[in-house]
């Protein structure tokens, strides 16, 4: 079988990618690799298409990542985790759209996510929000439309709030799949309370990190894999420190925890022996997802 990233379509050879973090790109490649596998957990044809175009553009700015992609060095466990998590977040959206078909889905810190192409029900309104450099570059590969829009802005500014306020007659689901890890607890609290204030009766699905994960051996392993081998440096560092999802309920009486999920809850054979950790709460919740209602 030929290399799926060989001889890619290359319409943007002169574009600079040095200001696009490697962590934004690695999840895209993981989804593409999984989609091309024999029995994919996730089928993301748009990620495959973008990856083929992107590879020659980042040879100078992200050489370690290109080497990993072209030579099959991306950690299979990372590919698996990314795919399982993306599929689960897709399912959160699909379930929400069953209740509210014309809902507004807001993807905070979207990176090069291609979720809209995977879950579009032809009625929803979808927003990708990320830093201007990421959104500007992403728009060279994915064109926004009437029901799929992009906003290049930090989530701590208010322009995106004003854009979304136009649709307050609809129901809102906010996703923060890879975002909160980069924030302190106070910054995460500020963002969540802002969402609750402006969009009451909305829901939030977000990834959390336990204190134990951020210290000791787990932190060393994470820094070695992402910072060293992948050349991501401090991009891979996490700041958020949450021991239990109930802690966020304490931030406001209107925040209610609906459910939680960890990859260890997934009974997929490729997880192998690590599925046994589902009964070990300290490991199961090292990095996990929580689903809230914001009243």
Image (cartoon, helix red, strand yellow):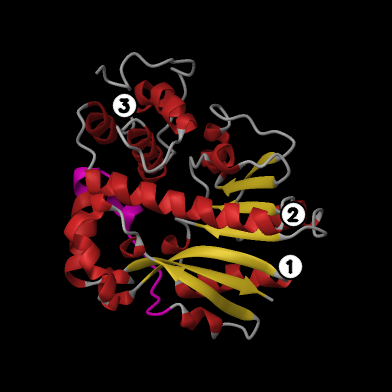
- Asked whether residue 236 is drawn in magenta, I would say yes
Give the residue at mark 3: 60
Q: Is residue 201 above or below residue 86?
A: below
How far from the left and from the top, in percent, is residue 290? 48, 69
Q: Is residue 80 visible?
A: yes
Residue drawn at (39%, 23%), measured in percent from left and top? 52
| Residue 8 rendering spot, x and y as whole percentages | 38, 16
Q: Does dot 2 land on a helix, a strand or a loop?
A: helix
| Element class at badge 3 | loop
Q: What quarter of the picture does the N terminus occupy? A: top left
Q: Earlier along the polypeptide chain: callout 3 or callout 2?
A: 3
Instruction: Calculate the distance from the C-alpha at mark 2 to the C-alpha at mark 1.
Output: 9 Å
User: Which is closer to the viewer, label 3 or label 2?
Assistant: 2
217 relative position to 16: left or right: left
Q: Give how far apart the Cα atoms at labels 3 and 2 are.
A: 37 Å
Q: Quadrant of residue 71?
A: top left
Q: Residue at x 28, y 35 (%)?
A: 65
Left or right of 139? Residue 196 is right
Q: Quadrant of the C terminus?
A: bottom right
First reached walking from the N terminus: tag 3 or tag 1: 3
Task: Name the residue nearer the viewer: 19 or 106.
Answer: 106
Residue under label 1: 198
Which residue is more in the foreground, 159 or 35? 35
Residue bearing mark 2: 164
Q: Which residues are magenta?
A: 228-244
Real-space CA distance between mark 3 and mark 1, rounded to the nearest whole angstrom: 42 Å
Mark 3 surroundings within 10 Å by alpha-carbon count, few (fewer than 14), some (14 through 19), many (20 or more): few
Residue 94 in picture, x, y percent from top left:
59, 52
Q: Position of residue 112 (x, y in %)?
A: 48, 40
């Amino acid at each position: 079988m030929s290399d799926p990233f060989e001889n890619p379509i290359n319409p943007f050879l002169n574009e600079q990618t040095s200001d696009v973090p490697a962590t934004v790109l690695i999840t895209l490649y993981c989804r593409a690799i999984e989609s091309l596998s024999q029995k994919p957990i996730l089928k993301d044809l748009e990620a495959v298409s973008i990856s083929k175009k992107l590879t020659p553009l980042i040879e100078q700015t992200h050489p370690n990542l290109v080497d990993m992609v072209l030579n099959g060095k991306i950690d299979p466990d990372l590919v698996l985790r990314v795919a399982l998590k993306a599929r689960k977040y897709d399912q959160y959206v699909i379930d929400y759209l069953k209740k509210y078909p014309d809902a507004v889905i807001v993807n905070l810190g979207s990176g090069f996510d291609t979720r809209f192409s995977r879950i579009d029900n032809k009625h929803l309104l979808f927003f990708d929000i990320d830093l201007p450099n990421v959104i500007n570059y992403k728009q060279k590969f994915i064109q926004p439309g009437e029901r799929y829009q992009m906003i290049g802005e930090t989530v701590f500014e208010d322009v995106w709030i004003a854009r979304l306020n136009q649709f307050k007659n609809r129901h809102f689901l906010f996703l923060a799949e890879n975002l909160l890890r980069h924030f302190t607890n106070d910054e995460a609290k500020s963002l969540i309370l802002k969402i609750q204030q402006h969009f009451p009766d909305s829901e939030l699905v977000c990834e959390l990190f336990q204190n134990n994960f951020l210290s000791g051996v787990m932190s060393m392993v994470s820094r070695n894999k992402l910072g060293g081998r992948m050349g991501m440096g401090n991009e891979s560092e996490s700041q958020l420190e949450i021991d239990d999802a109930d802690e966020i309920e304490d931030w406001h009486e209107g925040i209610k925890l609906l459910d939680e999920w960890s990859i260890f809850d997934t009974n997929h054979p490729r997880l192998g022996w690590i599925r046994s950790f589902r009964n070990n709460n300290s490991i199961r919740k090292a990095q996990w997802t929580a689903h809230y209602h914001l009243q």
